[in-house]
Image (spheres, rainbow, N blue to C red):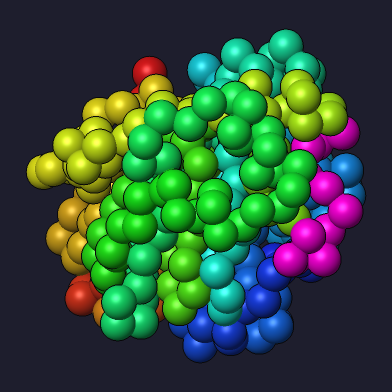
Amino acid sequence: MTIQVLPANQPETFYRGAGRIAGFRNVPAAPDRPEDWVGSVTTRFGLGPSGLSTLSDGRLLADAIAADPHWWLGPQRADPGVLVKLLDAGQRLPLHVHPDRRFATAHLASPYGKTEAWVILSARPDAYVHLGFARDVSADELAGWVTGQQTGQMLAATNRVPVSAGDAILCPAGLPHAIGDGILLVEVQEPTDFSVLLEYEEFGLADGHLGLGYDLALGCVDRSRWTPQRLDQLRGGRQLLPEAADEFFTAHRLSGGDRLRQGFSVLVAVAGEGSVAGEWDDLPVRQGDTLLVPYAAGPLRLDGTVEVIRLAPPER
């Protein structure tokens, strides 16, 4: 066997979950921890090794990849290039922003920023996300909101976007956003834990500027107006995600009868049951399973009623 069936990997964080990850998965999961980092070689910001995935043989995935990158990643990759999470919002998350690659290279010693995308698995009635400012916001106005922790004014200036199960939304680096409560989603992102928190006091945190100070950190925020037409461009058409995501990661919804191209990827089974098979593997898979597929697995096929989301680095 080459494909790895992954246990839950749920680092501590500052916001509440609601037990949805435990309900979704078929393996033990901590009901009070709202994130599951799937196939992760990324650590929580300033809190490593928290966040790293462990394989069934006890090795850290990061160490296994370092020992044999070609087997895991193939001939053209030096690192996985993506981080996948399950996220269970038991409360509204704080309004925050992720830096882009240019800002991260200049100020955070990383070639990756944190563009991300969400695939909604379940959502309460009237669920929503805050996404982008609904009007242009000046630098001084934003700084004043953050300094004074004027949460109401910040949120009132954003777009409140309804979401429901099946939706997929790209969230570019720089875009202010906050996931509302009552949502379980799959998130795919660049492999960092960089977040500039515009809200922090109400979440019991002292600050959220990545150690840069807010004078510098707020420079990564997109303060421009996001109209409904611009927001529509963040949703996929025939593809799960819009073409703008292709530079950062790929996400495909697949079902029994489909074939999977060779390459490093994470599979999240979102419905049904069946199997995933190839030259070296023939594994049962059902809703809630998370699988790590190395390059060495070769091409694969899905059988049965299972539906999966395949998440992978950009195609080259």
Q: Front-most of 137 and 106?
A: 137
**Res 270 visible:** no
Residue nearer the viewer, 3 or 26: 26
What range of the chain is rendered magenta?
A: 201-211
Residue 145: image quadrant is top right
Residue at coordinates 83% horizontally, 48% vertically from top-left?
A: 207
Quadrant of the drawing holding the N terminus? bottom right
> For the point 54% across and 52% down, which residue is it?
153
Quadrant into which the C terminus falls:
top left
Query: Closer to the camera, 303 or 81?
Result: 81
Left or right: residue 192 compared with residue 45? left
| 210 inside magenta stretch | yes
Q: Can the viewer see residue 16?
A: yes
Q: Is residue 312 magenta?
A: no
Q: Is residue 27 left or right of residue 248?
A: right
**Is 122 drawn above or below residue 301 in the view shown?**
below
In the image, 23 versus 60, the foreground residue is 23
In percent of width and height, residue 280 lies at 45, 53
User: x, y (%) of residue 233?
Assistant: 22, 36
In the image, is residue 107 above or below residue 35?
Answer: above
Q: Is residue 106 above or below residue 168?
A: above
Q: Main secondary structure of the magenta part?
A: loop
Residue 16: horizontal and vertical position, in percent? 67, 76
User: In the rendered image, which quarter is residue 68 located in?
Assistant: top right
Residue that appears at 88% across and 53% down: 206
* Residue at (63, 66) in percent of width and height: 35
Residue 156 placement (x, y as % from top left)? 45, 54
